[in-house]
Amino acid sequence: MHPILISAVSGYFLGSIPFGYLLVRAFRGADVRTTGSGNIGATNVARTSPMLGLLTLSLDVLKGAVAVGLALTIFPGTRTVAFGAALAAVSGHIFPVWLRFRGGKGVATGLGSFVLLTPKAILLAMAVFVVMVATFRYVSLASVTAAASLPVFALLLREGDSPVQIVLVSLSSALIILKHRQNIRRLMAGTEPKFKANRK
């Protein structure tokens, strides 16, 4: 089997593990998709339980890192394959087969996926995220801005060895931004809620 196919399939299935859904179901006996934004990601989980939100965030980051780490380990010297695994992991989180292809928004999984491949760009994108949240208190706006900045930083810092790798980063960012399209509409209409975690 071709390395690209192996990495894509393994990356997708690792990324598709719906940790937020599983944690809320296990510890709260509820379906996180029926509360808040209906998303299975850490932000919505945190509205139910900050602790579960933090755990969801950590696991979503980890699954992306594991997907890429496996690709780098099994196929050393072929970074493009690992970039493909990163895109697959993000796609798996956003479109998980287990939840009828209705998943999260891919931010945390994208962070974990690219931290091993474009660490400097990820640090700068995280800084953009923190500044945007601190300034505007819209997690969605911060997520979209950070996602959009990642391929730009990767290109400027030359953390992609080829145009194909930059394209794969850009596709991952585009998926994340596309998943935020309803948030973008609410931001433009002035109806997007600001993030406030319940302390439960």
Image (cartoon, helix red, strand yellow):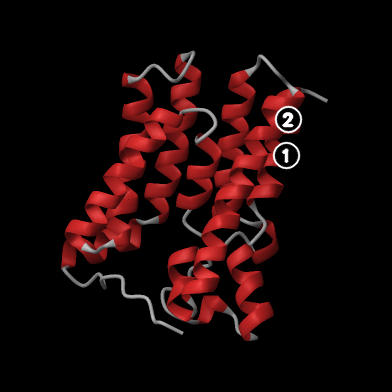
At a point 49% along the width and 78% down the height, the residue shown is 49
At a point 23% along the width and 52% down the height, the residue shown is 132
Q: Is residue 61 visible?
A: yes
* Image position of 113 (left or right of 36): right
Placement of 17 over or under 22, stated as above or below: above
Placement of 182 over or under 128, stated as above or below: below
Contact between marks 1 and 2 (CB within 8 A): the answer is: yes
* Image position of 121 (left or right of 98): left
* Image position of 11 (left or right of 151): right
At a point 26% along the width and 71% down the height, the residue shown is 194
Q: Residues within 10 Å of mark 2 (few under 14, many from 20)?
A: few
Q: Secondary structure at mark 1?
A: helix
Q: Secondary structure at mark 2?
A: helix
Which numbered circle lies on residue 9?
Answer: 1
Q: Is residue 38 visible?
A: no
Percent from the top left, x then y, of residue 60? 57, 54
Percent from the top left, x then y, of residue 130? 29, 51
Q: Along the line of sight, which residue is nearer the eye, 49 or 181?
A: 49
- What's the amino acid at mark 2? Leu
Quadrant position of residue 195: bottom left
Quadrant position of residue 98: bottom right
In the picture as drawn, the residue positioned furthest to the right comes out as: 1
Placement of 70 over or under 165, stated as above or below: below
Q: For mark 2, what is the residue? A: 5
Q: CA distance from mark 1 to mark 2?
A: 6 Å
Percent from the top left, x then y, of residue 72? 67, 26
